[in-house]
Amino acid sequence: MTGESVRTIRFYESIGLLAEPPRTAGRYRNYDVEAIEDVKTVRRLQASGLTLDEIDAILTLGREPQRRAELLSLISDKLADIDARLIACKKLKAELQAMARSSGRPGQAQSPNTVHAEKA
């Protein structure tokens, strides 16, 4: 249902990201809809670059309405981090594009003189 392995789900339980679910009479774990959604949320947030500690805080704060301000602050901080990473990625992209235009040599701009000198 979640696309995660049993081992991953057990790991999430062992570190407290997921509560251990009740068991059936046959001793099988019985996950409710909320637990399944939590697993999907953990995976999505982890794929987005959040740490397991940050994910734990988001899940915990999300279940406690009286701590909504803390949740919003945490989310705001993560959004600022993402914005900073986007800026860094755009700068890196521009640098790599410049390198590609200059035959892959860092710090060397493509110009007719450069091309001519390479041919000589």
Image: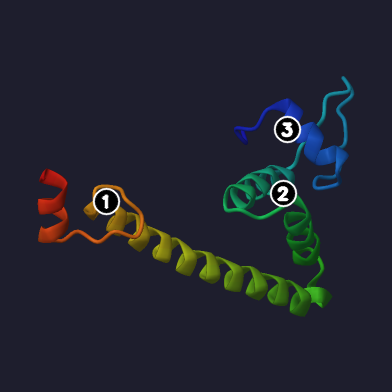
Please state, as top left, top right, bottom left or bottom right, where the C terminus lies in the image: top left
Instruction: Give the CA distance from mark 2 to mark 1.
Output: 48 Å
Q: Name the residue under label 1.
A: 100
* Residue 59 quadrant: bottom right
Sequence-wise, the earlier of marks 2 and 1 is 2
The first of marks 3 and 2 along the sequence is 3
> Is 31 situated left or right of 50 in this image?
right
Could you say where residue 56 lies in the image, as x and y percent from the top left? 78, 55
Dot 1 amino acid type: Ala
Disc on res. 8: 3
Q: Residue 35 falls in which quadrant of the image?
A: top right
In three-dimensional space, the C-alpha distance between marks 1 and 3, rounded to whole angstroms, equals 41 Å
Residue located 54% across and 70% down the image: 84
Callout 1: helix, strand or loop? helix
For the residue marked with disc 2, what is the amino acid? Glu
The disc placed on residue 34 is 2
Q: Pinpoint residue 32: horizontal percent, then vertical percent.
A: 74, 42
Towards the viewer: 20 or 42:
42
Q: Nearer the observer, disc 3 or disc 2?
A: 3
Amino acid found under the numbered disc labelled 3: Thr
Of marks 1 and 3, which one's residue comes earlier in the chain?
3
If the image is split into quadrants, where does the N terminus sit? top right
Residue nearer the viewer, 27 or 3: 3
Crowd tier of the residue under label 3, counting other residues whose Cα lies within 10 Å: few below 14, some 14–19, many 20 or above? few
Q: How is the image coloured?
A: rainbow
Q: Is residue 40 visible?
A: yes
In the structure shown, which secondary structural element does the residue marked by tag 3 occupy? helix
Residue 21: tell me if it is visible: no
Q: Position of residue 67 (x, y in %)?
A: 81, 75
The answer to whether the residue labelled 1 contacts the one labelled 3, judged by CB atoms less than 8 Å apart, is no
Tell me the mark number nearer the camera, choosing from 2 and 1: 1
Where is residue 29 shown, x and y percent of the image?
82, 30
